[in-house]
């Protein structure tokens, strides 16, 4: 196998830097600040955070490449036979100021064991505070178009996976409009390792132009205090999802990961209003009604 | 056994109403609003919420008395032999506006099975945004004094239990200064059921005068924007504890409880600042240094 883990990690690190400059260009004011950290058990990462920009209130673009030994508990949970692991990836969450600019999340990652077992995972999903159908269609069409270059089954399968994964079951709401989510991609009869990797790279490259389009379109939209309140309430739901359900967050908390890198996904400010009910026919009501699975945003 | 579950539930309901009027008197402006709800599987509750007062930004005092059938999963998790359950209790979380007034939490509860198995549980704990030693000593001394009226072992045992329970392990911080926490109290060689119940009643009665003292002492303290930021950051930690660790919250989310009653414990606004480090010798630093277990607040 010519594709090495170092090569994958290097590519991810470059992707991180590229995405950061794209986001800085879109923001026009704030710059990413980088914290470098070492993992006591092996490896480390570069956490890059942007704050208090023209557009972005708080965003993190995290790169890590870590290695070491898995605990028995985790080996068992993941059904693995070797405890020597290597993991690398890029993880992004961006919280904009303007309520009409969506929150976005991306993760692309590679995992490898000492015995040669490996897989890719990741995805991109969007959490608009206000769902605008045109934007949702654009976003899903961009993901579908990337997926379709590799495998016609990818988009339908990974779109459903995202719908199921980004679901706040105690609220009976999806977190946002979903996107794609995939895990455990390895070579099989229809795909080589290189083909899987090329797909993951294409997902990574889809992030910046797609999000920049959505940000540019909405960043100058006028908003009111009540739009900000709704944004903060939706951010509260984002916090609920990440702390209660998100597997990456739970894994990080349980394995004593670098807490500030794990929880950089949380917004600067979030709100909980007791029993808030949006008015009939309001934009907020319309958004709530669209926070459900199985909407065919790319079907048009 | 003369003490019936109806008698216990009635007493809890009266405790709820009494505490609400005490808190209204302390606030001087806002009034509790009551939502009555039915549980599809049996029973229901009265959720009372106070918002946007002079002193209290958001607070909930919840009473419930529910019954029905436990799922196999929960019976197994709790090690029970009968699936017919009855549960009643009062649960309180108060988030004040002024950063120098502490957040408080109380829970008193009674659980009974069809086969006659029963137990009491509960506790009171305090989460000051700024720990003031005099207040922490007052609070713990009040709890100790209540405990000591019943059993000299109660306070040391239940104080340690609270230290261990209200611990945010991923932050390596306690949530606040603890208090007392107890569970599975039933009759034994040294205590009758009535004695356990009298203790739980005494805990419930300790709440209002103790918290009113702390509120009255601090509610007029001057504060700055940076005090408010720190308050919001500590509230963020409160959210982390409740969503990641709190057993009552998790139980409620997993068993499809009334979500607005369960999550009324969350503050109106909370914040996460990336990698925030308080300045040396600041009040914030002093508080952080005191967010640890095993401080003998009642030892003086």
Image (spheres, coloured by chain):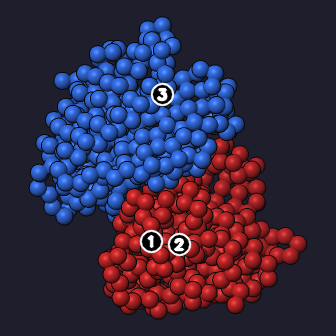
Chain colours: A blue, B red
For the question of whether residue B218 can be seen, the reply is yes
Mark 2 Cα shell of 10 Å, populated few (<14), some (14-19), many (≥20): some
Query: Residue A158, how many percent across, how many down?
Result: 38, 26
Query: Residue B254, how many percent across, how many down?
Result: 54, 48
Q: Are marks 3 and 2 on the same chain?
A: no
Tag 2 near tag 1, CB within 8 Å:
yes
Tag 3 near tag 2, CB within 8 Å:
no
State which chain disc 1 sits on.
B
Can you identify the residue that label 1 sits on?
B278
Q: Determine the CA span between mark 3 and mark 2.
A: 40 Å
Residue at 84% x, 70% y is B188
Can you identify the residue that label 3 sits on?
A6
Residue at 14% x, 46% y is A218
Residue at 15% x, 61% y is A224
Q: Nearer the viewer, residue A225 or A16?
A: A16
Q: Which label sits on residue B288? A: 2
Which circle, 3 or 1, is nearer the viewer?
3
Q: Looking at this rendering, what residue extends furthest in the top direction?
A: A189
In the image, is A74 to the left or to the right of A122?
Answer: right
């Amino acid at each position: 196998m010519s594709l090495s883990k170092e090569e994958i990690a290097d590519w991810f690190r470059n992707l991180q830097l590229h995405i950061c400059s794209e986001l800085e260009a879109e923001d026009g004011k704030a710059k990413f600040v980088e914290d470098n950290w070492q993992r006591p058990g092996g490896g480390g990462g570069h956490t890059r955070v942007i704050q208090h920009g023209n557009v972005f209130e708080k965003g993190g673009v995290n790169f890590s490449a870590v290695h070491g030994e898995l605990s028995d508990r985790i080996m068992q949970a993941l059904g693995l036979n070797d405890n020597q692991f290597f993991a690398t990836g890029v993880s992004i969450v961006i919280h904009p100021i303007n309520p009409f600019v969506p929150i976005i999340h991306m993760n692309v990652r590679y995992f490898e064991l000492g015995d040669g077992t490996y897989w890719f995972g990741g995805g991109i999903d969007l959490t608009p505070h206000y769902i605008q159908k045109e934007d949702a269609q654009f976003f899903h069409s961009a993901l579908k178009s990337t997926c379709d270059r590799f495998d016609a089954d990818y988009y339908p399968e990974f779109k459903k996976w995202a719908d199921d994964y980004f679901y706040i079951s105690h609220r009976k709401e999806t977190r946002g409009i979903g996107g794609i989510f995939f895990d455990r991609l390895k070579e099989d009869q229809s795909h080589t390792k290189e083909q899987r990797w090329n797909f993951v790279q294409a997902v990574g490259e889809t992030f910046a132009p797609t999000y920049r389009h959505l940000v540019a379109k909405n960043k100058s939209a006028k908003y009111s205090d009540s739009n900000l309140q709704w944004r903060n309430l939706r951010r509260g739901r984002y916090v609920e999802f990440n702390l209660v359900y998100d597997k990456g967050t739970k894994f990080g908390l349980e394995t004593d990961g670098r807490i500030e890198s794990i929880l950089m996904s949380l917004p600067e400010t979030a709100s909980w209003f007791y029993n808030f009910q949006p008015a009939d026919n309001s934009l907020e009501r319309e958004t709530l009604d669209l926070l459900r699975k199985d909407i065919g945003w790319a079907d048009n």
